[in-house]
Image (spheres, grey):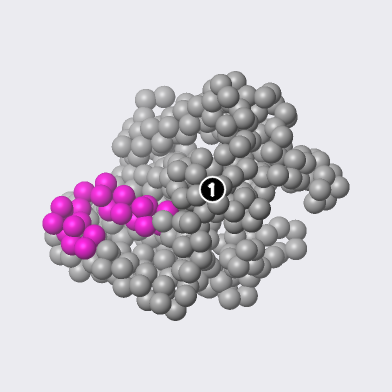
Amino acid sequence: MADKGIYRDRDGGLTLGHRQPVAQARKKLNLNFKSIRHGVDRPFLILILTLLGFGVLMMFSASYAWGLNDMGDGYYYARKQLTFAGIGLVGMLVASVWDYHFFQNTWVCYIFYIVMYGVCIYAAFFGSATADASRWIDLGFVQFQPSELLKVAFIMIFAYIMAVNFPKFDHWKYCVIPFTVIMGLTVVVLTLQRHLSAVMIIGVIGVSMMFVSGMPAKTFWKFMGILALVAVIGFVGLTLIGKFSYIQDRITSWRNPEGDIQDSTWQTYNSLLAIGSGGWFGLGFGESKQKFLYLPEAQNDFVFAVICEELGFVGALVVVVLFVLFVLRGFYIAANAKDRFGMLVAAGITIQIGLQAFLNIMVASNAIPNTGISLPFFSYGGTALIIQLAEMGILLNISRQGNIKK
């Protein structure tokens, strides 16, 4: 028989009622799909599928010439991306029905984070390197980028600590210290990988999640002060040992994209040519000129430039609007989540995808220095696409259990 008394609920608060036996609670938490009251958020699902379909189509167009050049097959990258998309959709389906509270467990959250952190350290020292950035592990059939999973682990552990410690947020040692330590460790390993864009994303995700968590303003600004101090000390130290020397070259290229078009500014210069050539309505699907080996990474980091060249300002605007709608609907799901943990996870994932899209578009248009970041759902990459779709499944799962009118 269940005991009656005061116990902690999922958000870490105190509740008067009956405590369920542990085995029964775990069974209900992970396996009782009847507790999922509604279907998924259909507008959000349609939005995901639209982004995925549009993304694969444009990636195919952008990759055709590079496929012929690299592999002797213009359909090479498209076929692989379709395979990754299929695997990702299966992952999205599973994640959409498996209770997201599975991650609201001390052992699951910490083990997930520690394992991915260890794999990222391995990648930093023993992984495959591209342009002096060691971020990948060669599995033979695919290049695995563990930092993509580290972002998910970071969101989960942040959401878990915030949900559990929320009643004690007035005591800074329960929120400022653990968040500073986790963010600091994450930034260090990403810096070792020379993954500056991921450092920026992790920083924004962490700060944004703390802002929406309900943390008292005094505690939040104390965290921001400590974080800023640690960031300055770390940046100065790494600069002195030459770890960030490449950043100055990228800033120089950003400020003058025509300064060295045969070498350091070649990629940015050709990206701007592609964007400018598109005009209002573009040259037509498949008619890009810059993708014919002029624009490096046309199928990856600079796929947006090809979209602008082929579909023009109108096509680029459609992409931007789709991501804006994605962010708005993601925050809507977060606002109507069943509990604090779900709200924070949904907010973190939404911020991650929206920020990546924003930074990629800014890089392609030379609004910020080149940071080597992909466009979600559009850029070629198996690890990123599969994990992004699995994250979409988690958001759909949160929408299933939330208070959203279907």
Task: Give residue 203's position: percent from left, percent from top.
Answer: 37, 57
Q: Amino acid at mark 1?
A: Pro
In the rendered image, the quadrant that contains the C terminus is top left
Q: Quadrant of residue 284?
A: top right
Q: Is residue 175 visible?
A: no
Task: Give residue 242's position: percent from left, percent from top.
Answer: 47, 75
Q: 401 or 133: which is nearer to us? A: 133
Residue name at image x 48 percent, y 69 percent: 245
Name of the residue lying farthest toward the front: 259
Task: Give residue 326's position: percent from left, percent from top.
Answer: 45, 34
Circle 1: element type? loop
Q: Is residue 321 visible?
A: yes
Q: 321 or 389: which is nearer to us? A: 321
Residue name at image x 62 percent, y 75 percent: 126
Residues rendered magenta in the picture: 201-225
Q: 389 or 10: which is nearer to us? A: 389
Residue name at image x 30 percent, y 54 percent: 207
- Magenta stretch holds residue 212: yes
Task: Give residue 10's position: percent from left, percent from top.
Answer: 30, 53
| Pointer 1 residue | 257
Q: Pointer 1: residues within 10 angstroms few (<14), some, or many (20+)?
A: many
In the image, residue 225 above or below residue 355: below
- Magenta stretch holds residue 391: no
Q: 237 or 9: which is nearer to us? A: 237
Left or right, 117 with reference to 235: right
